[in-house]
Structure formats: C-alpha cells, structure tokens
Image: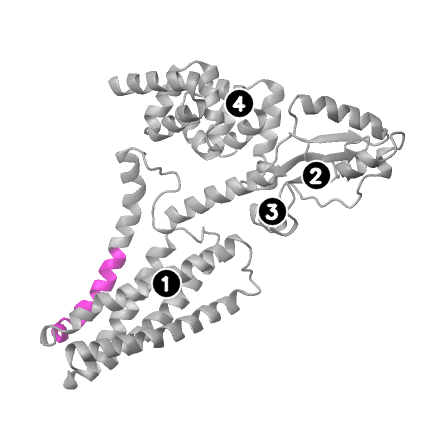
Amino acid sequence: MKKIEAALAMIRHLIRTEPARAAEALETLEQADSARILELLPEADSAALLERHPPQKAAHLLARLPAQRSASLAQALSPRQAAAVLGRLPEKTARRIIALLPKELAAAMGETLSYPAQSAGRLMHGDFLSFRAGLRVEEVIHRLRQLARGQVPLSYCYVVDGNSRLIGVLNMRDLLLADGEARIESVMITKVLHVSPFADREELVTLFSKKHFLTMPVIDTDGRLLGVVPTSNIIESTEEEAGEDIQILFGASAEERAFSTVWFKITRRLPWLTINLFTVFLAGAVVAVFEDLIARAAVLAVFLPIIAGQGGNAGTQTLAVVIRGMLMREVSPQNAWRLVKTEVLAGLVNGFATGALTALAAWLWKGSPFIGVIAGFAMVVTMVAAGLSGALIPLTMKRFGYDPAHSSGIFVTTVTDVTGFFSFLGLAWLFRAWL
C-alpha cells in the first residue's frame, strides 16, 4: 500500500509539472499498480495519462478497471484514442464497456468493433475534413482559415456529394490558386485512392509504402466516406505487432510487459516452456540411441552443441526473414514454394561453407580427418534442415490459420537439433571403425 501511495504522490506531482513523464512513470509500474492508480486519480487526470499511452498498453490497463470506471475514462478520451483502445480489448470486455457509454458514442464505438482486428475499419478515425460538392472555392478557403485556428488537421480535404459519397480530394495549392467564384468540383482531383474498412493492415502497409500518403480515405460499399487511416496509426500498429511477434516467436505472451507481475509471467511462459521441454527430450532421445557409441568415442560429445547451435541460429535467421516477408505481404501462396527453394539453397551453400570450416577445425583440433568429415557433412545436413524448416513451419502455420510467429522458433530449433544430432551420430556410427 505504501508503494502505491508513493507512486500516486509522484504521478500527481508530475501531472501538474511534466505530464509526459507522468505517463512514463505509470508505464514503469506493474499493471495491477497502474490500474489502481488510475482508479484513485481524478477522472480527468486518469484520462490524460491514458491519452499518452500507446493504445495496446492503455487497453491492458482499462481491462483491469471496473466496467463503470472504464466507461467513464473511455468517454473522457479523444474519440480517436477511445476507438483505438476499445478496439484492442477482448471483445466481451469492450462490449461491456460500450454498453455503459452514451448512446451516440456507443453506436460509433460498436461500429468500429464490428470490423476485424487490425483492419482499416479499426484503425481509421473521424478527424478529417470534407466539403459538399457545389461550394465555391472562396467559401472553402474561408472555412479552412477558421478551422486552422482550432488546430483541426488540414492534411487533406475531401469532397463528398449529398449522400456523403467520396467524389474527390482537394489539393491545397490548386485551391489557393483557383478563382474564388469557381466550384470546388472544377479544381478537385477525381481519382482518389481509397480502401475498404475490411482491408487488412498488410494491405495498408503496402499502399502507404508505395504512395507515401499522410492518410488514406476509407469508404463503404456505397462509396460513403467513413473515416481516414493516418500513416501514424499504421506505423504504431506495425510496431506493436512487431514487438508482439518477437515475444510470440520465442514462446512469450504478446500481452507480457517488462514489469508484468511474476504470476502473469509464469502463467504465460510455463505452457510453452513445458512444450519446449518435451521437444528437448525428443532431441535427447536421439542422442540416447547412440549412447554406447558416445561412451566409446567421447570426443563426439564435443561437437554436438556446435552443430545444434549453428543449426538453431541458421533456422532463426530464416524464420525472421520469412515472417517479415509474410508481414509485408512479400510472400503469397503463388511464390511460397520459390521462397522455400531459395532458403534451402541458401542453407546448402552456407552449410558447405561452415561445414568445410568445421571439418578443418575438427581435423586440426582432434587430429582425426574422419571426425572432421563427419562433422562437416552433418553441418551441411543441419543447415539445409534449418532453411527448410525455417521457411516451411511458418508457412504451414499460416496455411492452417495459426499465427506464423507463434513459437515457430521452438519447433524450428527442435527440427535442427534432431536432424543435426541424428546426422552427426548416424554418420559416426557408420564410420565407427575409423574413429
């Protein structure tokens, strides 16, 4: 309790003097403590702190609060932040909070949550400017001057018809140089790139990387302008996903943070550690088959971690490249097999290179050319297996609807360990008379 009181006093002081640092201080606490402080602070202060949090982190805190308090804070947030935070909550939790919001806001939030996670509908917001067709240029310029005083975003101005259908976008330069009496339809750009609210994040990343727009308009099936997706939202979402993928790749939970509680860390990590334990026993079982051989030629045990470590590193390299390619939509069902062949070929060449070095080192170190040849050949086999499994495992997981990053590293390491041990010890058994 004393820890909470001390943190609360510090954050209250920082809110008045350095609001940004107050949000940073809240992030350093365990989630349970942070949520407790949000309950104790005045609603306006708590909302200000959540406003400065990344949506994913704000969602974790909101989920720990009573529903009524969460609803009050969601209402106090900017519409953009509220939609981003509620969109990252578990659906049942979000629905429970939305039910407590005012009717108009609840309808808007409910519509946002009706779109798939990480879609344009979830990432869009309503901070955009649109003008009805038929207005004169001087009327639009006058209106823009008024809005600029209120710090309304003026990146793009869209033109809509009487049914709110998107029909064009205004270029500020063309607008300022046009005749003030002219209609805006005469100066607008009619070919406007837009997306559906169901477009996924990967599609948005591809479009933004090619076109370098600040925002992308989102329209429904009738062509009505629903909102815009800003570049900042895409970058933020991609950074969150990348961070989560790194954790998931190695068996940690996507929700885990540096200062999550010990119990939270245990419950999220232990299941995957248990699975990893079984896979390690599988690799150990391969070694056990050749136990008598290792007892007669103990020198073989020296090379097992070398081969396993090199294979694991190569597999993780391939895995990282493949998952990134899938995230950036560089990999599709049409070119997946070409990717597998490329990674296998890279593994083969790298295997011959590292295998030759391993063979030479083993020969000079232990004075036995046979051990060198066996270790070198096993390295080639292991590196090929690393390339093949590093590409196939995430592609297979994606094919069956699973997150390709979800602990693929554990499975790839198992394949490389088993293959490396079996190829090395199997060859050693075949050439045991010369060892």
- What residue lies at 48% left-to-right and 52% top-to-bottom? 401
Amino acid type, residue under disc 3 in the picture: Leu
Which residue is denoted by mark 3 in the rendering? 204
Would you say residue 121 sits in the magenta stretch? no
Residue located farthest toward the top when viewing the structure as drawn: 42
Q: Are marks 2 and 1 in contact (CB under 8 Å)?
A: no
Kindly state the secondary structure of the residue where label 3 is placed: helix
Q: Determine whether, in the image, residue 161 is placed left or right of residue 291.
A: right
The percent position of residue 395, horizontal first and vertical second, equals 47, 60
Q: Are marks 2 and 3 in contact (CB under 8 Å)?
A: no
Q: Residues within 10 Å of mark 4 (few under 14, many from 20)?
A: many
Q: Which mark is residue 77?
A: 4
Residue located farthest toward the front when viewing the structure as drawn: 177
Is 273 in front, or is 325? 325
Q: Earlier in the sequence, mark 2 or mark 3?
A: 3
The percent position of residue 27, horizontal first and vertical second, equals 38, 30
Amino acid type, residue under disc 4 in the picture: Leu
Q: Residues within 10 Å of mark 1 (few under 14, many from 20)?
A: many
Which residue is denoted by mark 2 in the rendering? 220
Q: Determine whether, in the image, residue 267 is placed left or right of residue 169.
A: left
Which residue is denoted by mark 1 in the rendering? 315
Q: CA distance from mark 4 to mark 3?
A: 26 Å
| Quadrant hosting residue 136 | top right
Q: Are marks 4 and 1 in contact (CB under 8 Å)?
A: no
Q: Which residues are magenta?
A: 278-294
Amino acid type, residue under disc 1 in the picture: Gly
- What residue lies at 70% left-to-right and 23% top-to-bottom? 147
Residue located farthest toward the left when viewing the structure as drawn: 296
Q: Which mark is residue 251?
A: none
Kindly state the secondary structure of the residue where label 2 is placed: loop
